[in-house]
Each structure stands twice: as C-alpha cells, then as structure tokens.
Image (cartoon, helix red, strand yellow):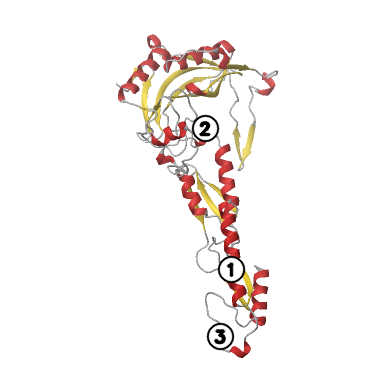
Amino acid sequence: KYEKKIAEEVYKREAPTYIQGGKPPGANLEGRSYFDVYEFDLGRSEDEPPLIIVGNDAQIALQASLLRAVDQLLAERGFGAFNFRKWADQFEEGFPSLTVGVSAELKKMRSGKDKNPWPNVAYGNRPKIVEISVHGNTKDKPDYKTVQFIPDRESPNDWHIFTGSYREIAAQIINWWNQKSKEKDAAAAPKGGVTSFKGTPQIIFMFRGVNDKKEAVNAEISLRLIKHTDNPKRTNLDLITTTDIKNYAKKIKEIFCSNNTPYIIKKGKEVVSYKNRDIGFDGSWYAVRSKDIGVELIKKLLAIIGEKFDQKYCFHSQNLDPSKRFPTETETITVLEEKHQLDQERPIADVAFKYANIYLPTTRKKIRLVTGATINYV
C-alpha cells in the first residue's frame, strides 16, 4: 500500500498526464511530459491490482497487447487470473462442469435420484462458501480476504474461517475438505456401511440405584439406530415409523425388564467397550465390576438392534490400583465460600433399569418408550 501511494505521487509530479479512475489528462499541452503513465487493468479480481505502464502512445499500445497475451497464456495454464466466486460456486456443487475423465462411480452418483454433489452428501447438505468483507469506504480495509466456510448448509452454526489470498483460501478449503472428520461432516451414510451418526435416532436408557453409603447412583446408556433417520431428506436411510418405535419398545421391555424384573448392572471400576461403527457402536465404554458383566450388557444392547456379539470388537481394561485411582472417599472443595462434595468416580453400586426414551434429532423430540415393566409407546 505504501509503495503504491509513493508511486502515485511520483507519477503525478513527473507525468502530468497521469490517469486515475478513467479521468482524461488536462488540456495544458505545454505542461505535458514526453511520456504517459497508465493503469492497465487486466480485469483481475479485487486482490490483484492493475499494472502500471509508461511510454508514448505506440509504446503503451504495444505493452498492453503483450501483457494481455501473456496474461491469457498464464490463465490457460492455471497461473493467471483466479475467479474465486466462480470456483466457490463450482466447489459447492461438486464441480459439475467437469465431465472429461470422470469415473463411472461419480457419473452414477450425479445422475441418481438425489444427484449428490459429493459422496454421501445430499444436495440440501452441500457446503456453502461466504466471503466476509468490510462494507463502505474505510481506511482499515484489510489487504487479505476472509471466508466463512459452512460444510453443511443445513447446519449454519457449524462453520470455519479461512483467510489469505483467494488462491490460499481455496487451497485451505480443499485441504480441510479432504482431511475432514467423516463422523462430523459426512451428511449421511450409505446402507451397508456408516460414515456418520448424524441424523440417526438414539435410544437413551436410564438405570438408578444406591451405593453402600445410600447415595444415589445413576447410569445413562445410549444406543444409536443407524439404520433409521427421522429426516425425510436423507433418502439413503430408512425413515423411522411408528411400527419401528413400537417394536423397539417391546424389545426393550423383553430384554431389560423380563418377567417384570428390572435388569441390574453391577457398576464398578473396570471398563468394557465395544467399537463397531458399522452397527452404531463408536467405542462407548461401560464401568462395571468385571469383564463378564460388561459383555453381558453389550449383548443385550446388540439384541435390541438385532446384531450378534463379536469379541474382536470388544475391549476390556482395568486400573492397576483402582482403590487409589477411584477412591471411595470423595474430595470436598470450597467455591464462593461454600463447601461442595465431589461425586464419586466409578462408584460401586447395583443400578436397576428404570426407563428408556427415544430421541429424534431432526425434530428434537423425545418419546418415552418403556417405564419399568410398562410399555408406554403402544
């Protein structure tokens, strides 16, 4: 910016015919110099300033034509002017104008019912790129660009900021998109496999009991129903129905309250986990008193969604000194001159099944399925 200001002042003093903003030179020919100074705008984007060319009329015309030819040559080879807005529009749509050399899988995806712009991304969930600019004439206008990148336009509050030149921002977006977390940013999962749990209903189980000090102990367990969705726009998943919900309620009652007797989890200090994303288990762990108790609980959860237990997905761990790592006596802290006792970490207690809800994420609706031995959703 400083260099440009200095150059403008020099041109004004040494060349009275200096043209700025399309204004013609003055009519005072006696004060005219032997050369003219022009700003030559190649029609580039805002972050690429015009060039300055100097000379007589013939030289100006020759320089302009040569520079234009070089600019066109560079543009054809990918080094010239860069239209960021055009690139952003193409990115949002998955570059539909690219047709030569496109794989058969990509052609099939684009010609399908949903015409997904990107793999596993429905059209309504395509990304959105918004440039953030300073409005009005301000001296504080930055010499860099800032862009708000929204991976899923149905989730406008989940966004990222990229800054730099247009070319740098485009590269940042491509790198982020290629390295993104499948769990967070894939809009939906194809049947037969899963890349995201987004938009899938969730069953929440609540267990309650007391420890040896007669203190209340709760255990909340969740189960993803990845074969279903409550969003009609996610056509690659089965839309959950009233019949589905009733069937889940019946299974929960049979498994966790057989013969009207609530199932009891023996909570403890060991951990058993199960990780198989293809069926909705993402490594959630359960604090139990032994490995066998944890395996039994996992088998019951799998039975609700009709899946079989496979020990290759099951993990078991325990602390070498649990009595010290998870002591029975809890610490008391003082906050705002008031004493508070911290909750016991991994308490030993028998917690019994109390109820189960299903949560529908799109409508944010919570439905009580089972309370004890009673099926609520019938």
Q: CA distance from mark 2 to mark 1?
A: 53 Å
Q: Can the viewer see residue 80 in this picture?
A: no
Query: For mark 1, what is the residue?
Result: 64
Q: Residue at (57%, 77%) from the top-left corner?
A: 19
Please tell me in which quadrant of the rendered image residue 142 appears. bottom right
In this orientation, which residue lies closer to the viewer: 237 or 229?
Answer: 237
Identity, as a three-letter code, of the amino acid under mark 2: Glu
Residue for badge 3: 26
**Residue appearing at x 50%, y 67% in the figure:** 136
Name the residue that disc number 2 marks.
183
Residue at 57% over, 66% down: 65
Q: Is residue 10 above or below residue 220?
A: below
Pinpoint residue 192: horizontal percent, then vertical percent. Answer: 45, 22
- Mark nearer the N terminus (2 vs 3): 3
Q: Quadrant of the C terminus?
A: top left
Q: Secondary structure at mark 3?
A: loop
Circle 1 sits in a helix, a strand or a loop, which is it?
Answer: helix
> Which image quarter is the N terminus in?
bottom right
Say which mark, if any, is on residue 340. Answer: none
Residue 161 versus residue 309 in the image, above or below: below
Q: Say which label, 2 or 1, has the lower sequence index.
A: 1
